[in-house]
């Protein structure tokens, strides 16, 4: 964690408000929104300090070039739009937290905006007071009207008539509590975190004609070492990092450029959350196969998971660690062996961040697969946006989806599935 700014002339209007709101933000929102709001702390001499868990050199919005300001503003607007949609969903569900989250800013002044490794960071996002003139409210945020204070009245002793009522209603309260727990556990999917679930209807992955079985579906999940890099790492930075000798890389561990590359959100973290969204959106009639890496030595077939086994699949993907090389070509062969692709339609969705790194030609492998299994398509979701694996999709009649925007990865991944496994695909 690092300090972004120290201010000696300001104080919080409501000292407990930031902690209360941030607990709600981290409870209901993904980390990308939680990290949007800097943490206020009281430092030496009662000065107000703003801290963040984001790694990298903080730069004020005014210090950025024009293109940097535009990119940061666009990313900020995406975060705030996602936050607004989440609050609206909470309101539909009658969640009391929605009213508290409405206290967060929706259109903050850029004078309160910083960039940390390309990520937006807001300070002064709660009402502020001038330390020298407590009655003056700092104008950079719109304070919410405080509720009228209600003084507690002394509690009168219970009358004998009221005392016998309490034991009477106690079994009823216990029964209601047990009923609530039963509903929560038997209908847990209705209460899961909003940001982990897909929005909208289930993707129409299965063919609706009873005579036509749904396509076989296998995913390739990249677990190479480069997945540990920050989601916004450029190809230039990645080549610079991996072309460096190991001993020099260790000696330069505190280099700001390397620290930015190793900061969250990593490609792996973003991929894991996006994969969860995809799994929860897939038609229950479609089983999901999963292939991962184990360096250049081997690829691992994690299995084929039915609808009932999807919680186990999601849990397993979130336990994956990124390490070693990228046997993309070998994983394609492994995934192709899991499906028919000749008389029955099949789809492979390759979730990768680059090209094969194990001295194999993934383009030639894809061409060979296309000749042997003409009804097999491979869609490529490239979260590094490098374009190095586009040939896989081109050879097999699939499509390429590429982005380094963490907010759009889940949408992109589901679009990749919708493109290949829709009802139109079954009728083709």
Image: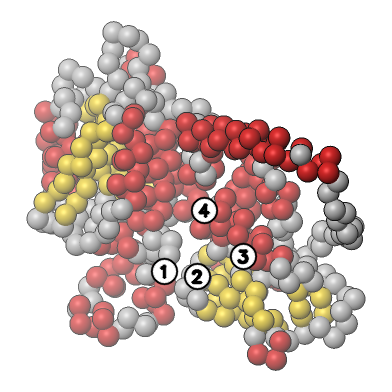
Task: State the image coordinates of residue 237 (x, y, percent, origin top left).
Answer: 34, 70
Task: State the image coordinates of residue 255 (x, y, percent, origin top left).
Answer: 37, 82
| Whether residue 174 is situated above or below residue 241 in the rendered picture | above
Q: Which of label 4 and label 1 is nearer to you?
A: 4
Residue 347 occupies which quadrant of the picture? top left
Q: Alpha-carbon neighbours of circle 3 within 10 Å: few (<14), some, or many (≥20)?
A: many
The answer to the question of whether label 2 and label 4 lie on touching residues, with beta carbons closer than 8 A, is no
Tell me which residue sits at (70%, 35%) in the image. 169
Q: Which residue is mark 3?
A: 37
How far apart marks 2 and 4 lie (CA) works out to 14 Å
Q: Which residue is mark 2?
A: 54
For residue 263, the mark is 1
Q: Which of label 2 and label 4 is nearer to you?
A: 4
For residue 371, the mark is none
Q: Alpha-carbon neighbours of circle 4 within 10 Å: few (<14), some, or many (≥20)?
A: some
Q: Which residue is mark 4?
A: 30
Of mark 2 and mark 4, the one earlier in the sequence is 4
């Amino acid at each position: 964690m690092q300090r972004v700014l120290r201010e000696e002339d300001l104080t919080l209007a409501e000292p407990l408000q930031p902690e209360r709101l941030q607990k709600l933000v981290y409870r209901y929102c993904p980390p990308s929104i939680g990290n949007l709001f800097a943490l206020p702390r009281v430092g030496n001499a009662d000065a107000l300090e703003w801290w963040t868990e984001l790694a990298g050199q903080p730069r004020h919005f005014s210090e950025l070039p024009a293109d940097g300001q535009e990119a940061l503003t666009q990313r900020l607007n995406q975060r705030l739009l996602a936050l607004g949609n989440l609050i609206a969903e909470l309101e539909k569900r009658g969640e009391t937290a929605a009213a508290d989250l409405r206290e967060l800013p929706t259109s903050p002044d850029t004078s309160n905006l910083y960039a940390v490794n390309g990520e937006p960071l807001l300070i002064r996002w709660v009402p502020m007071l001038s330390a020298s003139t407590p009655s003056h409210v700092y104008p950079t945020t719109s304070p919410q009207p405080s509720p009228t204070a209600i003084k507690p009245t002394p509690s009168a002793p219970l009358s004998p008539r009221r005392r016998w009522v309490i034991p009477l209603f106690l079994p009823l309260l216990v029964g209601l509590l047990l009923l609530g727990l039963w509903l929560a556990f038997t209908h847990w999917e209705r209460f899961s975190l909003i940001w982990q679930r897909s929005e909208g209807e289930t993707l129409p992955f299965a063919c609706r004609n009873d005579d036509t079985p749904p396509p076989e579906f296998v995913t390739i999940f990249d677990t190479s070492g480069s997945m540990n890099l920050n989601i916004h790492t450029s190809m230039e930075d990645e080549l610079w990092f991996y072309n460096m000798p190991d001993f020099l890389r260790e000696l330069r561990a505190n280099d700001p450029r390397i620290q930015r590359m190793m900061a969250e959100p990593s490609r792996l973290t973003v991929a894991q959350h996006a994969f969860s969204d995809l799994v929860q959106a897939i038609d229950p009639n479609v089983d999901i196969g999963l292939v991962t890496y184990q360096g250049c030595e081997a690829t691992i077939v994690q299995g084929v998971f039915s609808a009932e086994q999807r919680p186990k699949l999601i849990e397993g993907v979130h336990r994956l660690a990124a390490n070693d090389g990228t046997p993309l070509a070998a994983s394609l062969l492994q995934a192709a062996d899991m499906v028919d692709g000749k008389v029955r339609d099949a789809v492979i969705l390759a979730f990768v961040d680059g090209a094969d790194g194990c001295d194999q030609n993934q383009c030639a492998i894809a061409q060979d697969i296309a000749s042997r299994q003409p009804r097999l398509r491979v869609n490529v979701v490239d979260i590094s946006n490098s374009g190095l694996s586009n040939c896989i999709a081109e050879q097999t009649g699939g499509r390429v989806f590429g982005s380094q925007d963490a907010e759009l990865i889940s949408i992109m991944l589901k679009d990749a599935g919708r493109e290949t496994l829709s009802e139109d695909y079954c009728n083709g």
